[in-house]
Image (cartoon, coloured by chain):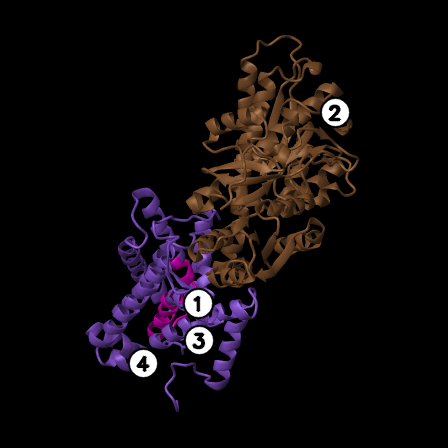
């Protein structure tokens, strides 16, 4: 938003100084919203306690911090994450809480990081200093999680995250990432191209900023090793008005699979244009916005048969299906990758708390580092097992290849995780 | 090769039609009211949201919702002219620039607050359709948008050249003071010009909806091209803006096709620089001026 920056530069006369004062007028409102969220979280927790007969030795609740953007540009996924986090805490508490701590209940403390890196830093600080936390989870968006995890490392509070950035596994001891890493996604995509055709000819189009260029370079490096030929490798400027010229080029390249590393709006245009051109090509839209319920709502039938990759999918096992059904009941949407992953993460925390028999964050970290599960909600992930290596990475973590089939995401890759056959378009 | 070239030209012309609606609005306001409306893109955005909500709430086809978005934005334009622009018209340009710029920021952030940054699309029966002729294809939604854009441009041209009000607008754009001396009411003329320009932006928004998304920044994508076209087609010249817009569309498309997918704008701006070097007043300027 270069315009708004210039807007701030407008100083000088009385009117514009009023503009400059605006932020101070806004922040108390946001503070109130935060307080509101914290309070509602408290009220919900109180409601949960009401159901249990209070005994003299009733255990203190265990505070779990949740850092998600519930306002700003990332709010849509962020609010979905909060809904999933609440569902997960309810599930743990309904099952009797943490038994080694006298049946202590989990108490979720939600904090809005407002889709902003600076706010994420201050909010993480505030959440840790203002509450006695045993662990934190968040923030879904890698850019925000990187910052939150730095703060958590310094404060020595464990953070468990569904974010896929490989950077989260570098030089950190309090950060745990139970799902596939970004570097694994590229490999999975290339292998999926070979499902479409033994002679995989891939056209890679990518938006020309950090996200597109870094991911596309990963694909380019791995392609020869996977026996995939890249016949077109083309950057484009995000936010174009017309995808036709680009698709014209893809058509001319003779590719049989198209990897589109794009933001959602561009991807929608690309998918529609491929359809209009009548080009018969398998499209792999990658992860992120592509594997969200909203994508199908926006693209409609044209999304059928499109492939992507995710770190979690709701059909991986029966437990995931149960979570999906409950999440659908609460929100009306299927449990997207971050939502389902978050339920698994909460159960991983519960497992660690159970074994640590303590709410002390350092002891919870110790217990997380020796976590080793292969059944139950905590193991509800592609691969079906969770065990953290010294870098906080799940040694069994792998992505799952998905395809849009009948308005739903079906797991199709790898073979062990496939729950539906690949539909060739 | 020829097929690819022809396809690229078709693609460029079709999207150029949308650029034309936006740039004609900008150039009309500049020609008549003598201010640069930086907020033009945001009115396109409002047009897309009007069509989006009419389509999702009442099931109205985005093309039909043109009959709502255009009058609504016309009235908005008249009101903005009457209550805001009129007060800053004077010898000094700065307040006008700040006013329309502030309007742009306000509308942009207001829509972010109200609608969030999510992309919203409308799916019509013809959204994914295309006609195939030989090896070429023509997307139906874009062809309709192009045809309506050209029809609206033609209507505007007829209005400007055959009606009294239209002639008064052209007179005011040629020489405001003399026009006033001849008994033309400038406030009325300005209000109609501003309203018409915004109605065109609204039309652009509605026409976009079957094949593009509604989101707060949508206007900024199109307004950049519009400003280039306005300068290239000579400031204030409606026909010049129209022709320049189509040229920009084709230049962008050829650039993406033959230079590189991230080089569409390079070709556009190279063309602009060349035009300015050889015809500093733009393509629409009368020779010898």
Point out which mark residue B231 bears.
Answer: 3
Percent from the top left, x then y, of residue A34?
Answer: 55, 35
Q: CA distance from mark 4 to mark 1?
A: 40 Å
The magenta stretch is B19-44
Point out which mark residue B136 bears.
Answer: none
Q: Nearer the viewer, residue A421 or A106?
A: A421
Point out which mark residue A360 bears.
Answer: 2
**In the displayed structure, would residue B126 be above or below residue B167?**
above
Q: Would you say the residues marked 1 and 3 are in contact, meaning their CB atoms lie under 8 Å apart?
A: no
Q: Which chain is purple?
A: B
Q: Which residue is mark 4?
A: B174
Q: Which subunit holds the residue at mark 4?
A: B
- In the rendered structure, the colour chosen for chain A is brown
Check disc 4: other Cα within 10 Å, few if <14, some if 14-19, many if 20+: some
Q: Both on one chain, marks 1 and 3? A: yes
Circle nearer the N terminus (4, 3)? 4
**SS of the residue under disc 3:** helix
Disc 4 versus disc 1: nearer the observer: 1
């Amino acid at each position: 938003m270069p315009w708004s920056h210039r807007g701030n530069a407008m100083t000088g006369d009385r009117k514009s100084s009023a503009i400059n004062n605006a932020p101070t007028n806004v922040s108390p409102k946001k503070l109130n919203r935060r307080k509101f969220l914290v309070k509602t979280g408290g009220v919900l927790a109180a409601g949960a306690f009401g159901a249990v007969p209070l005994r003299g030795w009733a255990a203190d609740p265990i505070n779990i911090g949740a850092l998600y953007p519930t306002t700003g540009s990332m709010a849509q996924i962020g609010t979905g994450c909060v809904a999933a986090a609440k569902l997960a805490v309810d599930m743990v508490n309904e099952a009797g809480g943490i038994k080694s701590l006298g049946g202590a209940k989990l108490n979720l403390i939600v904090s809005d990081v407002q889709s902003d890196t600076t706010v994420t830093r201050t909010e993480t600080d505030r959440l840790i200093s203002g509450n006695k936390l045993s662990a934190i989870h968040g923030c879904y968006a890698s850019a925000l999680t990187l910052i939150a995890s730095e703060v958590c490392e310094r404060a020595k509070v464990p953070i468990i995250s569904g974010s896929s950035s490989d950077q989260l596994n570098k030089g950190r001891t309090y950060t745990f990432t139970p799902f596939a890493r970004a570097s694994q996604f590229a490999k999975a995509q290339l292998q999926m191209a070979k499902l479409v055709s033994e002679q995989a000819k891939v056209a890679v189009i990518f938006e020309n900023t950090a996200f597109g260029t870094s991911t596309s370079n990963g694909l380019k490096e791995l392609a020869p090793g996977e026996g995939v030929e890249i016949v077109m490798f083309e950057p484009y400027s995000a936010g174009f008005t017309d995808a036709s010229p680009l698709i014209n080029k893809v058509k001319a390249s003779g590719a049989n699979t198209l990897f589109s590393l794009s933001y959602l709006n561009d991807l929608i245009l690309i998918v529609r244009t491929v359809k209009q051109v009548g080009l018969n090509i398998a499209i792999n839209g990658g992860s992120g916005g592509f594997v969200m319920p909203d994508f199908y709502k926006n693209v409609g039938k044209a999304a059928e048969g499109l492939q992507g990759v995710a770190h979690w999918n709701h059909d991986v096992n029966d437990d995931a299906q149960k979570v999906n059904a409950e999440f659908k009941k609460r929100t009306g949407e299927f449990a997207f990758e971050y939502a389902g992953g978050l339920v698994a993460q909460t159960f991983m925390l519960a497992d660690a708390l159970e074994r640590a028999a303590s709410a002390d964050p350092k002891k919870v970290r110790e217990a997380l580092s020796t976590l080793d599960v292969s059944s139950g909600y905590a193991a509800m992930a592609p691969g079906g097992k969770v065990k953290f290596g010294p870098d906080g990475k799940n040694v069994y973590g792998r992505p799952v290849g998905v395809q849009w089939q009948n308005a739903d995401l079906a797991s199709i890759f790898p073979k062990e995780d496939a729950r539906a056959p690949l539909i060739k378009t | 090769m020829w097929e690819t070239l022809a396809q690229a030209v078709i693609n460029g012309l079709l999207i150029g039609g949308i650029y034309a609606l936006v740039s004609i609005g900008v150039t009309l306001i500049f020609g008549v009211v003598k201010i640069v409306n930086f907020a033009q893109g945001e009115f396109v955005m409002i047009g897309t949201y009007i069509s989006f909500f009419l389509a999702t709430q009442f099931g109205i086809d985005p093309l039909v919702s043109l009959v709502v978005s255009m009058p609504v934005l016309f009235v908005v334009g008249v009101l903005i002219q009457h209550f805001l622009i009129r007060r800053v018209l004077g010898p000094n340009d700065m307040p006008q620039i700040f006013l329309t710029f502030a309007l742009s920021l306000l509308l942009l952030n207001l829509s972010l607050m109200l609608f969030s940054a999510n992309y919203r699309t409308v799916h019509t029966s013809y959204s994914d359709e295309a006609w195939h002729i030989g090896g070429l294809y023509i997307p139906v939604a874009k062809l309709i948008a192009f045809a309506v854009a050209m029809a609206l441009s033609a209507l505007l041209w007829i209005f400007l050249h055959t009606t009294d009000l239209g002639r008064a607008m052209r007179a005011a754009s040629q020489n405001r003071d003399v026009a006033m001396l001849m008994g033309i009411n400038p406030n009325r003329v300005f209000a109609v010009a501003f309203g018409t320009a915004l109605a065109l932006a609204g039309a652009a928004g509605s026409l976009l909806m079957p094949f593009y998304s509604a989101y707060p920044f949508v206007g900024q994508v199109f307004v950049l091209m519009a400003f280039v076209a306005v300068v290239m087609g000579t400031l204030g010249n409606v026909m010049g803006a129209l022709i320049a817009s189509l040229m920009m569309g084709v230049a962008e498309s050829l650039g993406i096709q033959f230079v590189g997918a991230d080089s569409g704008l390079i070709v556009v701006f190279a063309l602009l620089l060349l035009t300015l070097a050889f015809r500093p007043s733009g393509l629409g300027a009368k020779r010898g001026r």
